[in-house]
Image: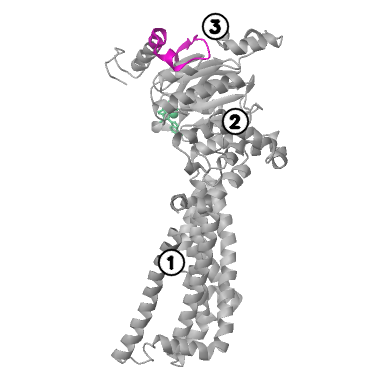
Amino acid sequence: MDGLSDLIRRKSASIALIIGVFVFWEVACLIGGISDIVLPRPTQIIASLIQYWPAIRPHAGQTLFTTLAGFGIGVLIGVAFGVAIGSSRLAYDTAYPLLVGISSIPKVAVVPIFVLWFGAGTVPAILTAAIICIFPIVVNVATGIATVEPELEDVMKTLKASKWDILWNVSLPRAMPYFFASLKVAVTLAFVGSVVAETVASNRGIGNMMMVASSTFNVPLVFAGLFILAGLGVGLYAIFSLAESRVTGWAHRKDLAVT
Amino acid sequence: MTLALAKVAPPPDDGMAAQETGSPETDGAARVSSARPFIEFEKVTVRFGKGDKQVQALSETSLAIAEGDFVALVGPSGCGKSTLLKLVGDLLKPSTGHVFVGGRELGATPIRIGMAYQNPTLLPWMNIRDNVMLPLKIVPPFRSEFSAKRKTEFRDRVEALLAQVGLAGFGDKFPWQLSGGMMQRANLCRALIHEPDLLLLDEPFGALDQFTREELWQIMQDLWMSKKTTVLLVTHDLREAGFLANRICVMSARPGRILDDSPVAFARPRGIDMTYEAEFVALNQRLRSLIVAARGGTGIVQAGGH
Ligand SMILES: Nc1ncnc2c1ncn2[C@@H]1O[C@H](COP(=O)(O)OP(=O)(O)OP(=O)(O)O)[C@@H](O)[C@H]1O
Ligand SMILES: [Mg+2]
């Protein structure tokens, strides 16, 4: 009971803060007489959200789709590489420099290449989202797997456990907290990737919609697009946070012990 | 040497049990006269690294351990005790020489091994029962029956073993709900649940307070007396070595080899009080001065020294 009321108190504080920011924004725009071409007020943004909703919806759906598709591909590839790199010294030494090299490329720069190969549209957005979220997943999964206590590994090896036994029973469960932490980061990064790609080379998606809106100086609609992105991002983050606390509660055992 | 050991090996009550079952020759005598000891080191050298940075951990070490024996390994820090244990566990290959277990060269030997370190390394996402059960999931022949028996026979087995080490009723708890001493008990259970032929212990009680440690010595003794597993124990605690082992091997400073090999002939079951008797203290002091000398000290027992 105590924990619950405490939770509500903490949540209510952050909700109050969010509302406060929007109220401040609204009031500052009104008092300062800031034009909606420069910075529309939240109420104007919400109004245009409602007004253009039929037009916004397919774009939002498209962005959500490309992001999740890219994220899914990124997770599959990221986990595969993470497991391979984390469980073998040789693979680690061999592949790590390449991964660091790839990760240091600004991902936006690969969009034109994807467009060249696959044409403008959905595919570059998916691929950009995928490539941008692979790296944090690889690094985290590999770290989780590579940091299994050597003593535990010895115990498993004296049991004549195969590599697969060790991976399945020890390394993978152990890497789960790392994996979920990276998922939360990766899903927000995937949004960055897909929106950037849509902005540059697509005629669908929130990124494209914002480009079009800004070229017609429909600034409230541009901000409406931002709101949608923020909403989607927060929603996915929340989903993965929830999944994380369900699957890897044991990693936050101190918290569990207190409540 | 091995003959002397064989005389020490069978603890009183089990010696009687063996006679009752009508096979007095199965323990000790028969085994010594038969082909080979259970574990045999033949001029084993281990080197780590290459070139200038090369470290020689073991130097032409030879050692023989009879089946069912309880051997403690003591020596200065860094002398290669853990290395020797890893060789037996097939976690490391000798640079030169040979290690035989069960009469066969390592790796080819289908014996069951249990291992416990100072760090209990229980899996935090599993409760104690599942942690202890882990070897049954991996080691044949239990492996193939695991899904069928995990809720019945294996579960009972785990509970029985937990009860033996004083953890009855803790199967549902998670490792973080246990104290260090309790985790170490669970760790011992995990090392024993698959009925290993050989138990390798690397300072398993090193991180515990003295009273918990002494309690676990007694539990360990009881477990050994009931299971007759061959045990190789690495420890820094000479009282622990003397209390538990049938035989204490002292290693030299690095590169390690066996300096001294003493039988411990006290009758079992041994009590903690025994460790304060004159004979026991004398053994301890002798071992201590050997180790001090091996460390490069004077060999003179310094008051209050460790
Ligand atoms: N993987 C390794 N690589 C390089 N050197 C090693 C390795 N393992 C052990 N050594 C070296 O071998 C020597 C013996 O190590 P070992 O762990 O066997 O000592 P120990 O007797 O168990 O010491 P302690 O009592 O402190 O645990 C040490 O000098 C150590 O530095
Ligand atoms: Mg050691």
**Up-down relation of residue B228 to residue A181 (above or below):** above
Chain of the residue that carries numbered disc 3 in the rendered image: B
* Amino acid at dot 3: Ala
Label 3 in the same subunit as label 1:
no
Give SS at disc 2. Answer: helix
Q: Is residue A76 visible?
A: yes
**Magenta run includes residue B237:** no
Q: Is residue B31 visible?
A: no
**Up-down relation of residue A148 to residue A141 (above or below):** above
Around disc 1, counting alpha carbons within 10 Å, would you say few (fewer than 14), some (14 to 19), or many (20 or more)? few
Quarter of the image that includes the C terminus of chain B: top left
* Mark 1 or mark 2, whichever is nearer to me: 1
* Amino acid at dot 2: Leu
Q: Is the distance from the Cβ of mark 3 to the nearest ligand 1 atom less than 8 Å?
A: no
B194 left or right of B5?
right
> Which region of the structure is painted magenta?
B257-283
Marks 3 and 1 sit apart, C-alpha to C-alpha, by: 73 Å
| Residue linked to disc 2 | B161
* Amino acid at dot 1: Ile
Q: Is the distance from the Cβ of mark 2 to the nearest ligand 2 atom less than 8 Å?
A: no
Q: Position of residue A98 (x, y in %)?
A: 49, 57
Marks 3 and 2 sit apart, C-alpha to C-alpha, by: 32 Å
| Residue linked to disc 1 | A8
